[in-house]
């Protein structure tokens, strides 16, 4: 969901909004249910549930959907979901991490493996790729939250580690264990974030272009479209004009 904002924004402009939103809501609901089942069903007492509900609200998910997802966990009729991480390589040697939340481990593994093989990738062992990434907190604000300087100043004040800004958003990175504290401090200054999550941030990026870039984007999009997949992270470096060409 969260690893490819520029590419996904381009895809959204191509008219896939409704299908993408429906799938996003189902993934957000699943995370809410799992978080509520893993701890207390009260967001104030359950940090993971608080994050899940905040992210759902930021995507304009209706309150009824959020309440229903929490009640599903309380009612005991929720499926038992497993959290699994897959790691592999896409075209051009790009590292890809896939986070899955599934009620059927065999189905999820078969689907992820098939998507990699159909799109020029190879699924590897756990740990084959994750050493190339840092596990961090990630807080995303729309560009309208403030100027690059204002957001940077707020982030430093809140104890964040880094900020990346572009024409669409500000992405603020924190230490893994400091996410909640930094998020709360930023909310006091910048308002509610678009999303707050634990992320895999590449330590360095792998340049990819041409046919390999096109196939990589198909791989990422196919993974994102799979019902069991919650998040996809990768370390490609694709030029902006190349992204526009691929979306054309």
Image (cartoon, rainbow, N blue to C red):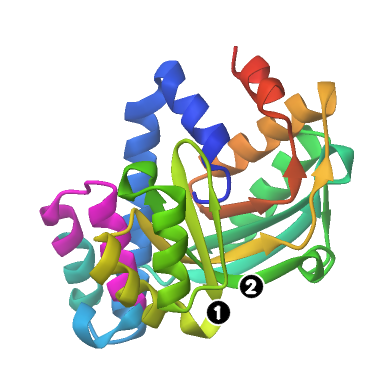
* Disc 1: which residue: 176
Q: Main secondary structure of the magenta part?
A: helix
Q: Nearer the viewer, residue 22 or 180?
A: 180
Q: Can I make out residue 121 in this image? A: no
Q: Residues within 10 Å of mark 1 (few under 14, many from 20)?
A: some
Left or right? Give the position of 160 relative to 142. right
Q: Is residue 57 magenta?
A: yes
Q: Is residue 8 magenta?
A: no
Residue ID at (58%, 72%): 136
Picture mark count: 2
* Disc 2: which residue: 135
- For residue 150, what is the image quadrant? bottom left
Q: Can I make out residue 48 in this image? A: yes
Question: Could you tell me residue 183's position as x and y percent?
Answer: 36, 72
Q: Residues within 10 Å of mark 2 (few under 14, many from 20)?
A: some
| Dot 2 and dot 1 residues touching (CB under 8 Å) | yes
Residue ID at (33%, 66%): 52
Question: Which segment is the magenta one?
Answer: 48-67
Separation (CA) of disc 2 from disc 1: 6 Å
- For residue 45, what is the image quadrant? bottom left
């Amino acid at each position: 969901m969260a690893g490819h904002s520029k590419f996904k924004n381009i895809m959204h402009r191509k008219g896939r909004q409704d299908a993408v939103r429906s799938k996003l809501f189902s993934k957000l609901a699943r995370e809410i249910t799992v978080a509520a089942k893993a701890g207390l069903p009260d967001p104030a007492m359950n940090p993971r549930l608080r994050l899940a509900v905040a992210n759902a609200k930021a995507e304009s998910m209706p309150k009824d959907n959020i309440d229903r997802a929490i009640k599903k966990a309380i009612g005991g009729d929720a499926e038992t979901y497993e959290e699994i991480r897959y790691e592999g390589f896409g075209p051009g040697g790009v590292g890809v991490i896939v986070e899955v939340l599934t009620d059927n481990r065999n189905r999820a593994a078969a689907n992820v493996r098939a998507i990699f093989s159909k799109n020029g990738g190879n699924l590897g062992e756990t740990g084959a790729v994750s050493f190339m990434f840092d596990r961090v907190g990630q807080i995303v604000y729309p560009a309208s939250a403030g100027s690059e300087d204002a957001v940077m100043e707020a982030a430093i004040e809140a104890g964040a580690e880094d900020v990346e800004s572009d024409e669409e958003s500000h992405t603020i990175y924190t230490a893994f264990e400091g996410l909640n504290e930094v998020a709360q401090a930023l909310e006091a200054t910048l308002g509610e974030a678009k999303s707050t999550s634990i992320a895999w941030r590449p330590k360095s990026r792998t340049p990819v272009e041409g046919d390999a870039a096109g196939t990589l984007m198909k791989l990422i999009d196919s993974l994102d479209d799979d019902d069991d997949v919650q998040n996809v992270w990768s370390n490609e470096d694709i030029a902006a004009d190349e992204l526009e060409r691929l979306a054309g």
